[in-house]
C-alpha cells in the first residue's frame, strides 16, 4: 500500500503558472508509470501527463508545450509544472502511479494506475 499526497495548485489568472507536487509514503516502491489526471466540472477524468520508468513522457495534446512532468525516480518528488494556464485547464488534479507494465502509460490511461492521490484544485480566472 502506497499513499500519494498532492500539494500545490490553487488559483491563478489566465496565463499564469502553478505547480503540483505528489509525495509517496514509500521511498522503496518502483512504479512503472506515474502521472497526472484531471477532471473538470461536468466532465470525465482526463489523462494529462505521464512519465515512464525509462524517462519517456507523454502529454495530452492540449497541454503540450505548457506543462512539464518530472520526478519519476523514487528519490524524487513527482511534479507537474503548469505554465500559460488557460481556463480550460481548471479542475481537480490527481497524481497516480502504476506498478505494472503496459501501454496504458503512453496513452495516459488510468486502467493501470494502482495508487491515487485525493486531488488538488486548480482554478484559472479569465
Image (tube, helix red, strand yellow):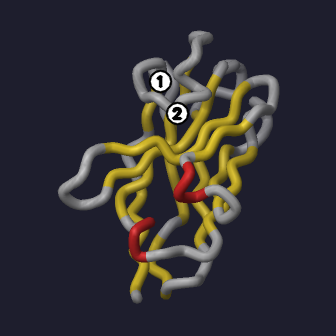
Q: Nearer the viewer, mark 2 or mark 1?
A: 2
Q: Is residue 47 above or below residue 107?
A: below
Front residue of 80/22: it is 80
- Secondary element type, mark 1: loop
What residue is rendered at 55% in x and 47% in y?
A: 60
How dense is the environment of label 2, judged by Cα within 10 Å: few (below 14), some, or many (20 and up)? many
In the rendered image of this protein, does residue 33 appear above or below residue 102? below
Residue 67: quadrant of the picture: bottom right
Distance of label 2 from label 1 (alpha carbons)? 10 Å
Q: Is residue 93 left or right of residue 56?
A: left
Residue in the image at 24% along x and 52% along y: 43
Q: Residue at x 42, y 78 (%)?
A: 124
Asked where in the image residue 15 lies, by quadrant, the reply is: bottom right
Per the image, the residue denoted by label 2 is 108
41 is higher (above) or lower (below) than 79? below
Q: Which residue is mark 1?
A: 113
- Figure quadrant of the C terminus: bottom left
> For residue 71, which numbered disc appears in the image?
none
Amino acid at each position: 500500500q502506497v499513499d500519494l499526497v498532492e500539494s500545490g495548485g490553487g488559483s491563478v489568472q489566465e496565463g499564469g503558472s502553478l505547480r503540483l507536487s505528489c509525495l509517496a509514503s514509500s521511498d522503496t516502491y518502483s512504479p512503472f508509470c506515474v502521472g497526472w489526471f484531471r477532471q473538470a466540472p461536468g466532465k470525465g477524468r482526463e489523462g494529462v501527463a505521464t512519465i515512464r520508468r525509462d524517462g519517456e513522457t507523454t502529454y495530452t495534446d492540449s497541454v503540450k508545450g505548457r506543462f512539464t512532468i518530472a520526478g519519476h525516480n523514487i528519490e524524487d518528488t513527482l511534479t507537474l509544472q503548469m505554465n500559460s494556464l488557460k481556463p480550460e485547464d481548471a479542475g481537480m488534479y490527481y497524481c497516480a502511479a502504476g506498478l505494472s507494465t503496459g501501454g496504458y502509460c503512453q496513452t495516459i490511461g488510468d486502467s493501470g494506475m494502482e495508487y491515487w492521490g485525493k486531488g488538488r484544485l486548480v482554478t484559472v480566472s479569465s
